[in-house]
Image (spheres, helix red, strand yellow):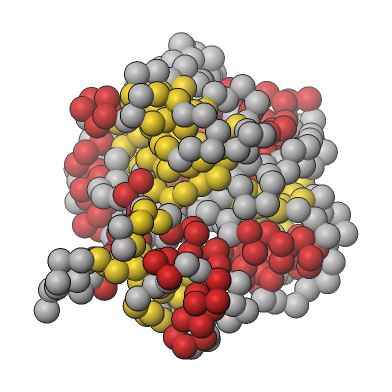
Amino acid sequence: MNLAEHVLRAGQAVPDHQALVVMGADGAQVWTHGDLRRAVLGTATGLTRAGLRPGDRLLMRLANRPAFPIAYLGAIAAGVIPVPTSAQLTGAEITRIAARIAPAMIVAGAGVPLPDHPAPVLTEGDLDGFATLPPADFAQGSADRLAYIVFTSGSSGQPRAVMHAHRAILARQAMMAGWYGLRAEDRLLHAGAFNWTFTLGTGLLDPWTLGATALIPADGTPIERIPLLAARHGATILAGAPGVFRRMLRADWPPIVTLRHALAAGERLDPGLRTAWTARTGTDLHEAMGASEISTFLSGSPSRPAPHGTAGFPQPGRHLAILGDDGPLPPGQPGALAVRRDDPGLFLGYLDNPDATRACFRGDWFVTGDMAQADDRGAITLLGRADDIMNAGGFRVAPPEIEDHLATHPHAGDVAVAELPTATGVSIVAAFWTGAATPDQMQALAAAGLARYKQPRAWIPLDALPRTPTGKINRRALREAHRKDRP
């Protein structure tokens, strides 16, 4: 099989149907499914003529432009291994990554920092020229062979290079009903950038796999304008990170009459945000939880919404467990969230790091690093990352328990809590928020609704919360920046 061939197959039946619409303030750029297929296979030809061979690695340094998914699929079509990376990475950061993956070539957009590395560089202009070349044949092989490499967010340490097989695209079928409710006639608007893996999968590859239409805002579009674009272009599904939905709710916009529901992922969705979205739009906001090593596997959906306060249910065909020291635990007991080893979407391993790969598994289970608890219905509540669990006065407390309550203040903005070490050798819980609420107001809210041991002892307003390149709250950075055990 070939992952790119699988993604483009449905579009052959509807070559004149819109595949991609890049929505700008002054109009839209449109690619049909026929245009998309020609561009991808022409790019595969161009990459081969440039000297790349199956198995070579292509480091992608492209900005938020349509060239990104076309280069990505073109590389996979040719059997080349694309390595997408965030355009926000600095020269020093991308140099370290290049040293680890040893790319045979780099494809670069204007203004995106490049590594200090001897690999030849293709420009975005070169890519544009490839799109009209004669189509290549899809490179075929085992579904278990390496297709692409992505990097973890690095929220709990150094980013790791995650290797995925061509079969990963087959596992995404579980999301179609288990999260998206996606149909061939849908117009899915993803509010993220082309060069974010959440956008690449949910916003582009999955709609194209069904022959549907992907709607993406043009680079530089303010988040507050996205609902207006959604209404103008007839979006039926809207996807983005929770922070995007929070910002959209602060803006004024008319009803999106075509919208059926919305999808959130990338960081935890607080229940209050879901409630506020439903009150504003009359549609539900369905959350999915995933990881770089397996994409999403746990979600609510239109056919089975997540009970309030939970992350939802295992997607169809996914086998999950909550593990204790001696194996899977019964409902009601907290433990480590894990996915069974035979899941087709599970990664091949970390590049050149077999020890780290082995450390992720307990027997037949891949351990995600998240703490969770299942109820009698099978709904799973996330309790935070294992390394984020706090010890408050001898009690173990998960950050979401506190964050969800503090986020109910109308002027809280973005909220996070973390455990900070102090000079006395004990740790305290600290709260961070970005809104206009005062420390006294936040403290009063905590006192009114949280047990004493859960109430933060330090209140630290910030202009913005530190985030990883993929947009997740970086509690590790909060701890390091604000720890109280050093001068």
Q: Residue furthest top?
A: 142
Above or below, 344 against 337 in this view is: above
Q: For this view, does 6 lie left or right of residue 486?
A: right
- Figure quadrant of the C terminus: bottom left
Q: Position of residue 23 (x, y in %)?
A: 69, 60
426, 21: nearer the viewer: 426
Nearer to the camera, 234 or 54: 234
> Of 139 and 467, which appears nearest the observer?
467
Instruction: Tell whether 456 sits left or right of 231.
Output: left
Q: Residue furthest left?
A: 487
Residue 8 pos. (x, y %)? 64, 28
Picture mark count: 0
Res 222 quadrant in image: bottom right
Which quarter of the rendered picture does the N terminus lie within? Answer: top right
**Residue beneath the point at 71% across and 62% down:** 275
* Residue 200 seen in the figure: no
The structure residue drawn at horizontal position 34% and vertical position 78%, both measured from the top left corner, is 458
Q: Position of residue 279 (x, y in %)?
A: 79, 65
Question: Residue 409's image quarter?
Answer: bottom right
Going 58% across and 81% down the picture, which residue do you hit? 411
Instruction: From this view, report whether residue 127 is shown above or below residue 345.
Output: below
- Can you see residue 305? yes
Snapshot quadrant of residue 202: top right
| Placement of 481 over or under 125, stated as above or below | below
